[in-house]
Image (cartoon, rainbow, N blue to C red):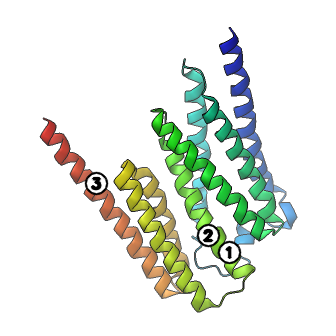
Amino acid sequence: MENKSRKFSLQVIMYLSFFAMVAVNALANILPFNGMNTGEISNLYNVLFTPAGYVFSIWGVIYIAVFIWLVNLSLNKEPIRKISASLFILSCLLNGSWIFFWHYQFVGTSVFVITALFITLLLLYLYERGQKGLVWPFSIYLGWVTVATLANISYYLVAEQQISMSSQAVSASLFLLLGLVIGALMLWIYQDRIFNLVFIWAYLGIFFRDYDSSRLVSLIALFSGIGLILLIGISFLKRGKNLSKIK
């Protein structure tokens, strides 16, 4: 009885945290906070490591995926693990906090908060994998927050450090290549194709957005995206060969 009561209490807190996070993100654009929506703040500066506006629709997919994870957790007869619950609640708090810092242009603080969110989601992702939990929702979420962290750092370099366009092209190119390496590692270590699909989605958005601003960054984004597609294809081929050997 005590376990059921504890599980119910954790469920309530987790659902409240989730819906509070979604509400804050929605209100930030409906009201909006500080007189600008989230996209308008992104467009205050010409930051090359920023995807086209349509790419941010992935947040809808993330919210649905995370909600599915919550429902699955509720339906599972096993007790809710404290580590999963704590990390998830913290991620919701950090996500909502980031919105405030972003909208009110505390750019340096927003970098710190989104980095903390990235670390929290990475720990939750690794823990869920270790516990054989439902991982794919966090493949999407972690993939996007990884991109968003790099984008936030790029925004900081432009808005606060006022780096030149040529320096920005170099930093954006390096971040794109870093993302390619991260994607390759996620495939190699965890065979996580969903994580890489998020990067491909973001990189195509950067390609289209930057085509006129910086041909160099645009093409690196395109070829990095193609590289990730090829790596996913190779991972499927290897998987097929391994299955045929087993048979």
> Which residue lies at the image location 65% right of the left edge and 41% below the top edge?
87
**Position of residue 213 measured from the top left corner of the image (x, y, whole percent):** 56, 87
**Position of residue 44 measured from the top left corner of the image (x, y, whole percent):** 74, 77
**Position of residue 19 measured from the top left corner of the image (x, y, whole percent):** 73, 39
The 10 Å Cα crowd at callout 2, few under 14, some 14 to 19, many 20 or more, is many
Tag 3's secondary structure? Answer: helix
**Position of residue 182 measured from the top left corner of the image (x, y, whole percent):** 45, 62
User: Is residue 197 in view?
Assistant: yes
Q: Residue 149: which quarter of the image?
A: bottom right
The 10 Å Cα crowd at callout 1, few under 14, some 14 to 19, many 20 or more, is many
> Which residue lies at the image location 34% right of the left edge and 55% below the top edge?
188
Using the numbered discs, state the Cα–Cα distance from disc 3 to disc 1 in whole angstroms. 34 Å
> Which residue lies at the image location 78% right of the left edge and 49% below the top edge?
24
Q: Residue 88: which quarter of the image?
A: top right
Callout count: 3
Label 3: which residue? Answer: 235
Label 2: which residue? Answer: 151
Q: Quadrant of the N terminus?
A: top right
Label 1: which residue? Answer: 155
Q: Quadrant of the C terminus?
A: top left
Along the polypeptide, which appears first: circle 3 or circle 1? 1
> Which residue lies at the image location 67% right of the left edge and 55% below the top edge?
116
User: Is residue 61 in view?
Assistant: no
Q: Is residue 139 above or below residue 82?
A: below
Tag 1's secondary structure? Answer: helix
